[in-house]
């Protein structure tokens, strides 16, 4: 079984453009999480899905951010009208919702907004 | 709100034990986790401990939890150059919120 994969690994965009990232979780994991990590900080939780339902959103997830998981498998995170402050590593994790709910992370998508 | 604190740097000699410490504030934490992050990479789960446990050992790793003081530590025995990385402590709070809260990470530096 492969791990969590994310695409693209790097994205450079100009301020004001829209970007979309994709995450493919470990197969059969029913939970999928998005986090954001900036330089020198730990990951910060953005949102998570159980199957296709989005169950929790952080206050960090502004109106310009939207996430979907339409069939309960892969997920997309879209940022509209990007700002320089959106520059960060966007991490995806997946888990099976039992006991410790251990989350396994993908390699991340590094976003640079010019 | 919850908060997780870690020292930013730890320097140890190769072959010695490393002890990375973490404090947290949320008394309802159910599970606590240790992750490792190498440069340019995602996070690798190392180990976790349930809040009603005091200790967990997994090969070279030993996790100690003092729930009364809300203090968690990760001991790495016989530290090797490959252990050089950033180590993150994370908590999962009780009450149904399932996003993890991470500390800022401890840079482990290995001296030859």
Image (tube, coloured by chain):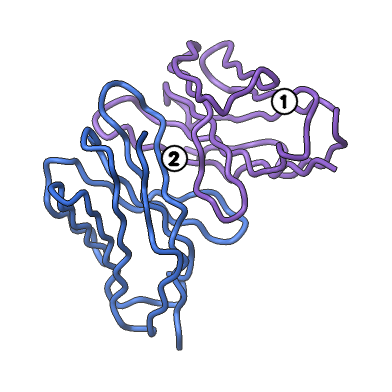
Disc 1 and disc 2: Cα gap in Å? 23 Å
Task: Confirm or deny contact between disc 1 and disc 2 (CB under 8 A).
Answer: no
Q: Is residue B37 above or below residue B30?
A: below
Residue that appears at 30% across and 61% down? B21
Residue designated by label 2: A104
The chain coloured purple in the image: A
The chain coloured blue in the image: B
First reached walking from the N terminus: tag 1 or tag 2: 1
Q: Secondary structure at mark 1?
A: strand
Packing grade of label 2 (10 A; few <14, some 14-19, many >=20) is many
| Residues at discs 1 and 2 both on one chain | yes
In the orientation shown, which residue stands out farthest toward the bottom? B112
Q: Chain of mark 1?
A: A
Residue that appears at 28% across and 76% down? B17
Q: Nearer the viewer, mark 1 or mark 2?
A: 1
Please tell me which residue lies in front, B80 or A113: A113
Disc number for residue A79:
1
Packing grade of label 1 (10 A; few <14, some 14-19, many >=20) is many
Q: Is residue B98 left or right of residue A18?
A: left
Return the x and y of residue B57 as percentages of the image width and height: 19, 58
């Amino acid at each position: 079984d492969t791990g969590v994969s994310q695409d693209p690994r790097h994205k450079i965009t100009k301020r004001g453009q829209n970007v979309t990232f994709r995450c493919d979780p470990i197969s059969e994991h029913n939970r999928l999480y998005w986090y954001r990590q900036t330089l020198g900080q730990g990951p910060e939780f953005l949102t998570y899905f159980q199957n296709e339902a989005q169950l929790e959103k952080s206050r960090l997830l502004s109106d310009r951010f939207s996430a979907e998981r339409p069939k309960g498998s892969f997920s997309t995170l879209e940022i509209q009208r990007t700002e320089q402050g959106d520059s960060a590593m966007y991490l995806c994790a997946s888990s099976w919702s039992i006991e410790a709910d251990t989350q396994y992370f993908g390699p991340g998508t590094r976003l640079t907004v010019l | 709100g919850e908060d997780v604190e870690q020292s930013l740097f730890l320097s140890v000699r190769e072959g010695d034990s490393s002890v990375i410490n973490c404090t947290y504030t949320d008394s309802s934490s159910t599970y606590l986790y240790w992750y490792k992050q190498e440069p340019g990479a995602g996070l690798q789960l190392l180990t976790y401990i349930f809040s009603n446990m005091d200790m967990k050992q997994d090969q070279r790793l030993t996790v100690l939890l003092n729930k009364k003081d809300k203090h968690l530590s990760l001991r790495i025995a016989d530290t090797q150059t490959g252990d050089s990385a950033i180590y993150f402590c994370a908590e999962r709070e009780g009450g149904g919120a399932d996003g993890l809260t991470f500390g800022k990470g401890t840079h482990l530096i290995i001296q030859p």
